[in-house]
Image (cartoon, grey):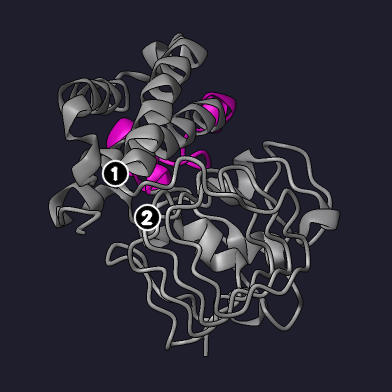
Amino acid sequence: MMIHERNDKMWEPMKSDCSKCSGLCCTALYFSKMDGFPKDKVSGQPCINLLKDYRCKIHSQLEKQKMKGCIGYDCFGAGQQVTQVIYQGRTWNDIPNQAAEIFDVFVIVFQLYQIRYYLIEAMSLVSAQPLAKSIQCLIEENIKMCHYRPTNILSIDLEQYRNRSNTILKQVCKLLQKSMHSENKKIPANFLGGNYKGQDMSGADLSTKLLIAANFEKSLFKGTIFLGADTRDTNFSNADLSEAVFLTQGQVNSAKGNRNTKLPYHLDYPSTWK
């Protein structure tokens, strides 16, 4: 049974391109050293390793220095949207009097991009076609909001939009599990550090599950739902994730794997996966 219909064009804007950003993730967001960042920092303060050209001074050393927070982060493409489109190439250094506004806009657009990522994947699911019209309307609304002027973006009722999107995504998950006859599939309540090597996890709903340091080497994940799952140090070496659902680049970056791991076509192999 085919899970996804391929649509490369819709995924293109969801790819992060740091060369077109202005270090927004390294400046606008709060960091904690406990979460694998260089040091604690408040939102609006540049990271100590952010260079003047908005590149990272220790990017090639992130794995060696165990900067897991930096390795696992992905903005879904929101950074270049804010820098290149909304502010037309001007950065928080160019217009320091608007720096706080730029950071606040980025935080909102980042969340909108994250929601859009899930909606785009929902649109690609064969089982979700009965909801295609509703999903498409939410995507179009999202794109429109991400092209607003800054003052309009700051007045968006994000929670109202998020709640409407979450309602649809929950329905999508139910349709997917129904199509795979996995509505009642039993899964462990706790995956932390567990050994599930070679197991068939197809159709399982792992939404918001803690998969930290669990071993899924050589496991199969056809139609497995990863919505909000915590994959820090999860071992996916030689596993088949090619038809996993709602798996993000950030989740992949946070996990362990190798070049024999099969990923969904729209995701990239992290440089840490040898």
Judge left or right: residue 22 versus residue 175: right
Please tell me whether residue 193 is drawn above or below residue 13 in the rendered image: below
Q: Position of residue 32 (x, y in %)?
A: 81, 49
Residue at x 39%, y 52% (from the top left corner):
245
Residue at x 40%, y 15% (from the top left corner):
164
Q: Which residue is mark 1?
A: 179
Q: Is residue 57 in view from this perspective? A: yes
Q: Position of residue 75 (x, y in %)?
A: 47, 48
Task: Examine the residues drawn in magenta and state their main secondary structure.
Answer: helix
Q: Are marks 1 and 2 in contact (CB under 8 Å)?
A: yes
Judge left or right: residue 128 versus residue 180: left
Q: Which residue is mark 2?
A: 223
Image quadrant containing the N terminus? bottom left
Q: Amino acid at mark 2?
A: Gly
Front residue of this view, candidates 15 and 45: 15
Disc sitting over residue 134 in the figure = none
